[in-house]
Image (cartoon, rainbow, N blue to C red):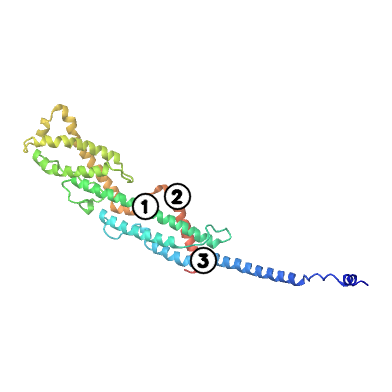
Amino acid sequence: MDPIQQTTTTLQPAPPPSTKPSKKLAIILFAIVAVLLLFSVFGSYYYLEIYQPNQYAKKVIPIYDEITSNQMGIGNNQGSNTYEDVLIFLDQYQAFLTQAKVKVATLKPSPLKTAPSFLANTKRSQQIQEDFTRILEFFIDNISAAKTQVQFMVKAKELFLLLRPDLTAYPPKAELAGQGTPLPPPPSTAGEFLTVWEPRISKAKIIAQELFDEPQDVQGIDLEELKSLWQETEEGLDVLLPFLRKQDSKLSMSEVQKLIPEGEKALFAKVDKIDEFRPKLENVLIRNSGENILRYQFEFNNSKKGEFETSFARLNTNIKQLKEKYGK
């Protein structure tokens, strides 16, 4: 037999490799991946729904308790209720709330931007964070409005005292707080009128300009009415004071009136508008006392009142649930 033919005849194809080991390896790898995936899912769920909310509760509850223990600042000023003291108190409380807002901002309720519905604890933490921030911003904004109101009233009180030479302070007595003070008798002579009013009017004009000519963000005050009355008063004083300087200082005011030219009497008569202006300005002081501004400091921003009440009620409910769940 030919050797080549013999070689060809005796060669056989190699048997295919066995697939049993590779299938077994695939099953093992699949099982390992499944276990790792299970641990990953469970670990993520534990972190997001158990660990993270617990840590968040430990941090947010003390901040909430610190604020509520201060009664949210409403009527918590135990000292004097003068405008100056109220302004100091509002500055201090605004700083306190601003610091609380910084503390809340540092809290991280969840690494997720928006938690799915099945992560109830995480969603609650995120809702607390959102509501707490909104409420603190509301308080801080309204304290700013209250401070603006107080600053306006400080100037209004200064103007009122300039126009009431008989008073050295306002209110003059505790028993007169909350009610109008009786007007003093007018000066009897031209000299007395100049002595009393001339130095006061120059100062009053400056303050009135600050009150009425500059934009003012104040609540519950009819600035246009006050401004109109003051302008008429000022127009009358601008003609009356120079006129009085030319007269005998001993002349009575009734005699002075007889000397006023007939055609100018209407202009001079505008001075009498001061008797309308002073009571209206005093009424503003009564309604916007330091005590009242403190009491109603969080009612200025009425445009967001509904949103605030919803957030506030929801925050209280969620914090209560946190305390019950985590034993705080």
Taking 152 as reference, is 113 left or right?
right
Q: Mark 2 points at which residue?
A: 306
Image position, residue 295 (x, y; %): 34, 54
Q: Residues within 10 Å of mark 2 (few under 14, many from 20)?
A: few
Q: Which amino acid does label 1 sit on?
A: Asn
Q: Do the residues labelled 1 and 2 touch (CB within 8 Å)?
A: no
Q: Name the residue under label 1.
A: 142
Q: Residue 52 carries which label?
A: 3
Indicate the quadrant containing the N terminus: top left, top right, bottom left or bottom right: bottom right
What's the residue at 40%, 48% (across, down)?
302
Question: In which quarter of the view is residue 274 placed?
Answer: top left
**In front of the other: label 1 or label 3?**
3
Q: What residue type is labelled 3?
A: Gln
Q: In this rendered view, identify the residue nearer to me: 205 or 263.
A: 205
Q: Are marks 2 and 3 in contact (CB under 8 Å)?
A: no
Q: How far apart are marks 1 and 2 (CA)?
A: 15 Å
Image position, residue 227 (x, y; %): 26, 39
